[in-house]
Amino acid sequence: MKAEPAEGGRDGVREPTQAEIGEEVDRLSENGVAGPGYDEPALEKIAALTWRISRLKEEKNAVIAAHVYQRLEVIRGVADFTGDSYRLSLLCAGTPAEKIVFCGVRFMAETAAILNPGKAVYLPAPEAGCSLAESISAEDVRRLKAQHPGAPVVAYINTAAEVKAESDVIVTSSNAASILKKMFARHPRVIFLPDEWMGRNLAQELGKEAGVEMILWEGKCVVHEGFKEADVDYYRRLYPGAKILAHSECSPAFARRVDFIGGTGDMMRFIEQREAPHYLLVTECGFGDLARSRFPRKQFVPMCRLCPYMKATDLRRIYDALADPQPDQIVRVGDSVAVRARRALEKMFELTDNG
């Protein structure tokens, strides 16, 4: 369901005129906010709120960061920057704004807070968690390190701040393989957590034995564990010549049957650089909405699942977080945890920048 913005507010920003709403509708349409669910009445309701949000974030010296799985009206309507976890980490680290409204899930907002000490970070949907991040605790990591002394901990960014603080380096789906290669050049064994399937996919890519050279955790993504390999055969029969792209959080059995596996940034580059009669994007549905808005002349077939955590954020909650943030919308990370977690994140930047 698309956002249903309420009218009025406590922020002092006036209501837009009908002419201003019309101009905002035109802007949204030009930005690709169109298609099912975005008829004229819905767009007018959305436009009334995106207009107010745009002026409120300027007044508050705030920026809005949105993950690629967010609703299209968030990404194309109010976000200052959009991307996968790695890109958002970089952009959050470099923003001059005093406030960051993070449209994503809690571990992402925590990362923004870690990289921006002294700035206010707001999470519009405070209940937006992550099945991967919730699958492992800092105590679990400490036990793994005790069981495998000397093995560095490489943690996927989909982890809580406390887990990052126990890790040696953070990775994203876009840089995990290259960073792991560098870690294996110096260590015979590496602990990779928390996504077991991503770890197995990476172990196969790197020629490492899962469970021996690459110690794994048993975390799973609630979105990607729902895809079954039989689905690939079904869609290939329906759409001959289609390119099927899957996120690396999918199972190894599924990954072996698709045309490409990687992170969302890698998937977007694949679409841009290759022509196919259809593209099937096996990940969260918001990524397909974004791809359609960026490549309106290409044909996309839904083969996705909704993330209940990502879809908890809508325009109304973004507006509220800007106008009058509630205590549970303010993201805080303790100093001792933030210092150690920042060290692991900075190691990611260092190893990525070095090629």
Image (spheres, rainbow, N blue to C red):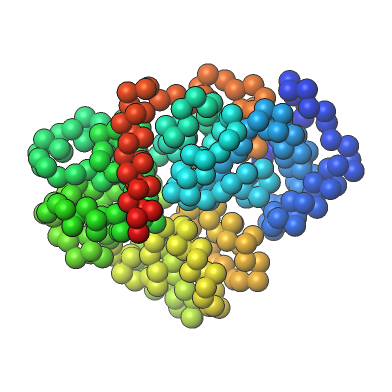
Q: Nearer the viewer, residue 350 or 298?
A: 350
Judge whether 79 appears above or below 33 on screen. Answer: above
Q: Residue at x 22, y 52 (%)?
A: 183
List x then y, in percent, for residue 303.
48, 62
Q: Nearer the viewer, residue 79 or 293?
A: 79
303 lies left or right of 203: right
273 lies left or right of 315: left
Q: Quadrant of the C terminus?
A: bottom left
Q: Residue at x 31, y 39 (%)?
A: 344
Residue 340 appearing in the image: yes
Picture quarter containing residue 165?
top left
Picture quarter containing residue 134?
top left
253 lies left or right of 76: left
Q: Residue at x 44, y 70 (%)?
A: 244
Q: Nearer the viewer, residue 64 or 225?
A: 64
List x then y, in percent, for residue 115.
44, 35
Q: Residue at x 42, y 32 (%)?
A: 114
Instruction: Name the residue at the bottom extreme.
Output: 240
Residue 129 appearing in the image: no
287 lies left or right of 217: right
State the count of labels.
0
Judge whether 150 appears above or below 258 on screen. Answer: above
Q: Quadrant of the N terminus?
A: top right
Judge whether 147 appears above or below 98 on screen. Answer: below
List x then y, in percent, for residue 345.
36, 41
Instruction: Name the residue at the front extreme.
Output: 354
Judge whether 93 appears above or below 179 on screen. Answer: above
